[in-house]
Image (spheres, coloured by chain):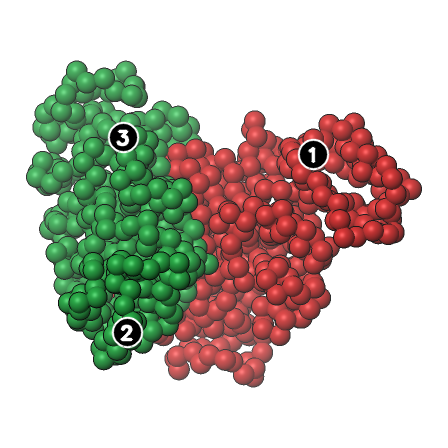
Chain colours: A red, B green
């Protein structure tokens, strides 16, 4: 018998309740345990819910009813936010309860502190649902790929952003229309800032870096660009070169330093990552033994994310069956993770896409090419649209590998030239 | 300290040795254990090896040196074959040793018996490496998706067959040339029967059905068609309709019965499964909570498969840290799995691809259409190649869902007609 205390009864909480009702038989067969929710912590007892919990479930607005109830073995935190969630998790761990959370923002900010507290008590602090919804990427990095030195990690970790970019690509919508459509379909929240500005993706990246590289990378150390600057024009131009634009989280280790970023990035259309459509998520991991692995699935939603929460509940069950079990929440035996040495963003090396907006004068192409050559940026492909002329002509260059510092310098130089009519657009290429 | 006894020092054994040498630091950091190989069982002590084991490793030709050595905690069976491997695993379990095996053929035939023996002793019998190489599909089905009712499973599980089909598709090779190329590259063995006849894929499917559906499906109950009958012509015709031909393992549950098959199958080119190229593997799982999940990676090879073996070693480590731990090898608490109720192959419903080879007479199209209509097979698309005429003209029909029994009956009927010059080719469509 395992009793859960659930904090938060929104989308994922409802999914968890549904899974426990609909798949009760399978869950019992696999765990040998009767697992149920005893109490649900909500803000508003009167609010109508899309899903009806079992009649014996108790509702409360008081966190004490989870933390102080000796019947409750596990607190499942699905309410989001920082301070209240952190307080609840801390109190639950102090009370000797295992914790499952989907709160990537909290983990990105305070993961090491909470992990240390759990480790000091031998308690589980599980978070499969915090990254990529139903995709078992936490488990895969922590356990299945545990014998690998992870060399690189690339993820599409935000379904809202991917939906918007996919619609801009396949239905030729502009950003605002695609965003509105995402809201209408319930894929984007009323305030979509975290999704479209890349912040949610950065939270998840920080969580994955810990699991993959065994180091703590500070959230504020991740350079983040969202998708609000991605235009229909750049998507079309990228497509002409055989690329799709995706919001990618990336991390890799180079000579002991970790490079991390969240940016709209051109991905060759032949890559599986370029084919991740709609609100799906995917994570590609390169291990020095396993080679490249990709996991693809629903990155959000009620029962997909609930499935991940239940994976954690069932993992807890396996450990709880044995007295003396101590949970390894990080995959590194609960030792505090060292701080990552950060590769400064300006040293980052990548191929790049440039779109210059220029007046159609003789010598423009030569001036741009010269500036790039002087900054040691080698051009792989170039196109000036033959059917355009006048005062605002796009010239697109795709480059070979170049340092971010050189890229920034050449953009500064070209943007200051008299023929440039609008700031240059630049994205990295995977 | 964990000491492994390794049986077999071929491709995967060499990969395991390399991983233990090259990633020793990471493995120790994650497990807190010094893991090493004590003894390697080989057939020929004099044989030159591509990889050199650590100097303290002992080589032997006597299985007793693994089974009777009290220092050895885990026997890793990577020698393949049935009788000798079964005998070794049985003896190791009786001697109280945990076992890790990559032997899908043995598991497909004798998995339940070996699992029961391991369960009776509380020992681990782990087999992540037996299916899809480095892809953590065993772990994902057994644990991460444990709260799901699995509705369907589709896999590309044989890298050799996928390489051959991919080369036939992208380089327009015929089967024999693609097979020769696979052999030259080391992707196919000297005797490639198991790979190209679909038998290896069927072994893996039986293992996955147990994990996904919790039932034992007899190997001889899986209808198997290999790829030797797949022609360049069918690959090209399928491509004209927007499909790729892949060797798919499929299983799904319909009203409590399990349908399983291994067949060359047309896959819409927009599906990620159609994009699985070269010698890669992929598994798509549909769970009633998580929705569709796809895992993609190297399905064979030294360190990719070695990575999966090491995942099992590290999972054993976690359990061994606690006295009294009993391993759950099936994901169903080691209870014997019930026999699957089998959906008879003739009741199977699917869309289909037909290629009729006919003499170019008036009324042929009408006769074929009439036969299909009489068998309740509804046509979705049809093409008779306009640039072909004479005594052997291909007519291709793509159908809506139809029962396998009706498909077989209409083929019998049409193949008996006077205008048919060669047996009709038929593949299902995913």
CA gap, disc 2 and disc 1: 61 Å
- Single out the mark in the foreground, 1 or 3: 1
Locate the N terminus of chain A and report the quarter of the image it occupies.
bottom left
Upstream in sequence: badge 3 or badge 2: 3
Q: Residue at x 44, y 81 (%)?
A: A52
User: Could you say which is closer to the camera, residue A139 or residue B162?
Assistant: B162
Res. A379 mark:
1
Residue A62 higher or lower than B82, as above or below: below
- Chain containing mark 2: B
**Percent from the top left, x then y, of residue B361?**
27, 68
Would residue B100 appear left or right of B19 to someone viewing this image? left
- Other-residue count near label 2 (Cα within 10 Å), few / some / many at <14 / 14–19 / ≥20: few
Q: Which residue is mark 2?
A: B363
**Dot 1 lies on which element?**
strand
User: Could you say which is closer to the camera, residue A106 or residue B104?
Assistant: B104
- Other-residue count near label 1 (Cα within 10 Å), few / some / many at <14 / 14–19 / ≥20: some
Residue B244 higher or lower than B343, as above or below: above
Locate the C terminus of chain A and report the quarter of the image it occupies.
top right
């Amino acid at each position: 018998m395992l009793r859960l205390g659930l904090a938060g009864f929104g989308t994922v909480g409802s999914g968890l309740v549904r899974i426990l009702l609909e798949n009760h038989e399978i869950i019992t067969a696999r765990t040998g345990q009767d697992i149920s929710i005893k109490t649900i912590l909500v803000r508003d007892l009167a609010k109508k819910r899309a899903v009806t919990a079992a009649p014996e479930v108790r509702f409360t607005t008081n966190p004490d009813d989870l933390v102080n109830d000796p019947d409750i073995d596990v607190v499942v935190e699905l309410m989001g936010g920082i301070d209240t969630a952190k307080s609840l998790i801390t109190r639950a761990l102090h009370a000797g309860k295992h914790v499952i959370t989907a709160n990537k923002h909290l983990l990105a900010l305070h993961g090491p502190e909470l992990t240390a507290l759990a480790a000091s008590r031998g308690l589980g602090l599980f978070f499969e649902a915090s990254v990529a919804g139903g995709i078992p990427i936490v488990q895969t990095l922590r356990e299945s790929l545990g014998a690998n030195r992870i060399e690189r990690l690339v993820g599409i970790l935000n379904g809202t952003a991917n939906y918007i970019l996919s619609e801009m690509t396949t239905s030729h919508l502009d950003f605002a229309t695609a965003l509105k459509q995402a809201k209408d379909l319930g894929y984007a929240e009323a305030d979509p800032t975290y999704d479209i500005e890349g912040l949610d993706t950065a939270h998840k990246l920080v969580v994955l870096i810990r699991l993959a590289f065994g180091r703590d990378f500070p959230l504020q150390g991740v350079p983040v660009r969202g998708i609000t600057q991605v235009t229909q024009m750049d998507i079309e131009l990228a497509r002409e070169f055989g690329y799709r634009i995706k919001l990618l989280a990336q991390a890799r280790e180079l000579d002991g330093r970790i490079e991390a970023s969240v940016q709209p990035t051109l991905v060759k259309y032949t890559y599986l990552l370029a084919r991740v459509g709609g609100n799906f998520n995917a994570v590609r991991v390169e291990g020095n033994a396993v080679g490249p692995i990709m996991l693809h699935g629903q990155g959000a939603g009620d029962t997909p994310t609930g499935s991940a929460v239940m994976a954690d509940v069932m993992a807890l069950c396996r450990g709880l069956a044995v007295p003396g079990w101590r949970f390894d929440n990080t995959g590194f035996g609960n030792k505090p993770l060292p701080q990552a040495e950060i590769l400064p963003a300006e040293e980052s090396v990548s191929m790049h896409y440039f779109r210059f907006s220029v007046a159609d004068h003789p010598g423009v192409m030569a001036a741009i090419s010269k500036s790039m050559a002087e900054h040691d940026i080698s051009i792989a492909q170039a196109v000036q649209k033959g059917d355009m002329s006048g005062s605002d002509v796009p010239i697109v260059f795709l480059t070979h590998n170049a340092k971010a510092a050189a890229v920034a310098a050449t953009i500064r130089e070209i943007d200051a030239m008299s023929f440039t009519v609008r700031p240059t657009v630049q994205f990295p290429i995977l």
